[in-house]
Amino acid sequence: MANSLTRRWWVQVSAIWALSRIVSTIGFAWMAYQQGPTPWQNTGHPAYFDFLDTWDAEWYRRIFQHGIGHDPGYPLQLPTYPDGSVRQNAWAFMPGFPLLVRLFTMLTGGAIEWKFLAPNLSLILSFVLALVLYKLFRLKLNHETSLWAVTLFGFWCASPVLQSAYAESLGLLLLAAGLYFLIQHRYLAALPWLVGLSVTRPGMISFALMLAGMWVLRWLKARRGTDTFPSSERWKLAILTGFGGLLGLAWPIIAWAFTHRPDAYTVTELAWRVVSPHAQLVLFEGWLRLGASIAGDFWAPMFVILCLLASAWILTRPSMRVLGSELQLWTGAYLLYLFLVFNPQSSTWRILMMAFPLIGGFAYFSRNWTRFAKVTLVLALIVVQFWWLYVCWLFASPDFTPP
C-alpha cells in the first residue's frame, strides 16, 4: 500500500516541494536571526512571520487593509513630492493576492491576521502550483524529467518568495494553469485563469503577444499543410488574442479611471527608478543603462542586441523546442516584455520566475545527467538560494538590493 502510494505522481511532486519549502524555511529563519532593526521592525531578530512581512509584502498588506480611496491603499490622487514627482504608492501593485487573502479572512471570521494568513496561503498555493507545473511539463516531457523540472524550480534562488506574502505563488499558478489549457487549445478553459492573472501580476500584455504569435504560427502551418486550423478555432484564438490585449491594459486603465491620470500606473512604476516630475517610460532604457554601466555608453546598444540574440538562441535550442511552440512563444514574449519595460536589478531573479519554461528546457537538457551531478546541482542551488536571501531579503541600510 505504501509503495503504491509513493509511486503516485502527486505524492512525489508534493514530497519534492515539501523538501524545497523546508529548505526555504530554514533560510528565512536563519536570516531572521541575523536581521537587525529595519524600517518594518524597530528591534532586531524578528520572529519568522514578522520577517516575512517586509519589502513588497508591506504594500500588499496596505492594499488588504485599506483598499481604494486611502493613501496607504490605492490613493485617488497620486502622492507627489513638492516638485510634482510621483512618490511610490500602491498602484504599482495589483489587487489579486490581497483580495484573495481578504476572502479567506472573511471565511475565517477574521480569526487569522494578515502576517500569518498571507504567507501561509501563499505556501498552500505554491503546493498547488507545483502540481500544475508538473502536469504542464508532463504534456511535453516524461515523468522523470517533469519531476526534475519541478525540483529545479523549487530550489531556484528566488523560490523562498513563494511562501511569503507576495503575489508570486498566485500569479504563477494562474499563469501555469492558463498555459496548461492553452497548449491543449482549450481556450475557454484558459480564459478565467488569464483574467485572474491580469489583476495579480504584470506582464499580461506579453500573453496577448504570445497568443498573436500562436495564431500566426498555426495559420502558416495550415498553409503548408502541416497542421489543421479550422475557421472556428481561428476565430476563437483571434478573439482570445484581442481579449488578452484588453486584459493586459486592464490595470493601467483601472488606475487611470480612479486617479484621473492616464499615466498613473506607468509613473507609479517609474517612481521606483527615478524621482522626476517629467518621468516617462523609455523602451529598453533599463537595459541600456545596465549596458552602459558594464561597457560604457557607446557599447550599450550592442549589449542590448547581444542580450536579445542570446535569448533567441536559447529559445531555439532543441531542449526548448521539445516543450512546444506555445511555451517557446510565451517565454519569448515575456522576455521581450522585460527587455522593453523592465529595469534590471536585484529583483530580476524573482521576476524571471514567470519564464519558468526555461527551467523545463534545462531539465530536458540535463535529464541524462548522473544522480551525483543532479544532487550536486541541487546543493549548489541551495547555496545560491541562501546567498540570495542574505543579499536581497536581509535588510542592511542603505539597501539597494530588494528581493
Image (cartoon, rainbow, N blue to C red):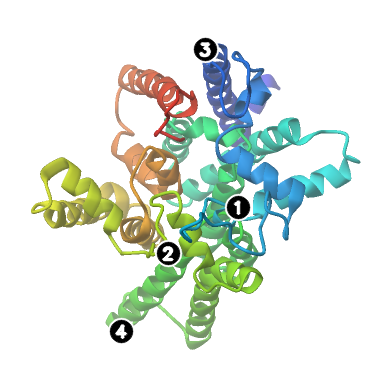
Q: Residue at x 60, y 74 (%)?
A: 260
* Quarter holding residue 377: top left
Q: Rounded to the nearest whole Å, what is the CA distance between mark 1 and mark 3?
A: 29 Å
Image point (70%, 32%), residue name: 120
Secondary structure under tag 4 reads helix
**Residue with the mark numbered 1:** 90
| Viewer-side label of 2, 1 | 1
Residue drawn where x is 73% and y is 47% of the image: 64
Q: Sequence order check: which comes first, mark 2 or mark 3?
A: 3
Above or below, 162 against 391 in this view is: below
Residue type highlighted by circle 3: Gln
Q: Which residue is mark 2?
A: 206
Mark 4 vs mark 3: in front = 3
Within 10 Å of the Cα at label 1, are there few (<14), some (14-19), or many (20+) other Cα atoms?
many
Kind of residue at disc 4: Arg
Choose between 289 and 371: the one closer to the eye: 289
Structural crowding at the residue carrying mark 3, measured as other residues with C-alpha within 10 Å and reported as few (<14), some (14–19) or many (≥20): some
Question: Looking at this rendering, what residue extends furthest in the front direction?
Answer: 82
- Which quarter shows the N terminus? top right
Q: Compared with residue 68, is residue 401 higher up or lower down, i.e. above or below? A: above
Residue receiving disc 3:
34
Identify the residue under disc 4. 223
Q: Is residue 109 left or right of residue 153?
A: right
Q: What whole-number distance in Å separates the C-alpha atoms at marks 4 and 3?
A: 62 Å
